[in-house]
Image: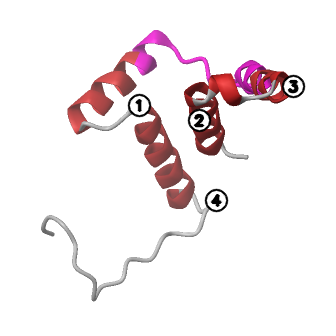
Amino acid sequence: MTRASFAEELESAADRIADIPRADLQIILRRAALMLRNVAGVPLEPATDDALNSIAAEMKVSRSDLIQTVLREWLETNSYLPVRQIDEDSETDGSA
């Protein structure tokens, strides 16, 4: 189960809290606790953390999206992932 689908399940349960059996609610809450316990952040130096936050704000993207983009591009550049192919016949935003 993905985090997004689990978050949707939690929101749905919150919307119908009176109709959910106690056992089902316990299961959902235990899974939520387990997911929270297993979230491992990457500790960053303060300067790196500040730089990421500044760049994300400047680019108007979330910090998480910025980190995913940077990591994916680094992996592609260093041949750990195949480079994504862009269809040259497709429309693109911006200009080259």
The reply to whether callout 4 and callout 2 are in contact (CB within 8 Å) is no
Say what secondary structure mark 1 lies in.
helix
Q: Which residue is drawn at the image coordinates 47% and 53% (left, top)?
A: 73
Of mark 1 and mark 3, the one earlier in the sequence is 3
Which kind of residue does numbered mark 2 sit on? Ser
**Pointer 3 residue:** 23
Disc 4 versus disc 3: nearer the observer: 3
Q: Quadrant of residue 22?
A: top right
Give the magenta-colored segment's residue range: 31-49
Whole-number angstrom distance, CA of label 3 to CA of label 2: 16 Å
Of mark 2 and mark 1, the one earlier in the sequence is 2
CA neighbours of label 2 inside 10 A, class few (<14), some (14 to 19), many (20+) = few
Which kind of residue does numbered mark 1 sit on? Arg
Q: Is residue 41 magenta?
A: yes
**Pointer 1 residue:** 63
Numbered badge on residue 12: 2
Of mark 3 and mark 2, the one earlier in the sequence is 2
Say what secondary structure mark 4 lies in.
loop
The reply to whether callout 2 and callout 1 are in contact (CB within 8 Å) is no
**Residue at the farthest right position:** 23
**Residue at the farthest bottom position:** 89
Say what secondary structure mark 2 lies in.
helix
Of mark 4 and mark 2, the one earlier in the sequence is 2
Numbered badge on residue 80: 4
Q: Quadrant of residue 50?
A: top left
Q: Which residue is drawn at the image coordinates 58% and 42% (left, top)?
A: 4
Whole-number angstrom distance, CA of label 4 to CA of label 3: 45 Å
Of mark 1 and mark 4, the one earlier in the sequence is 1
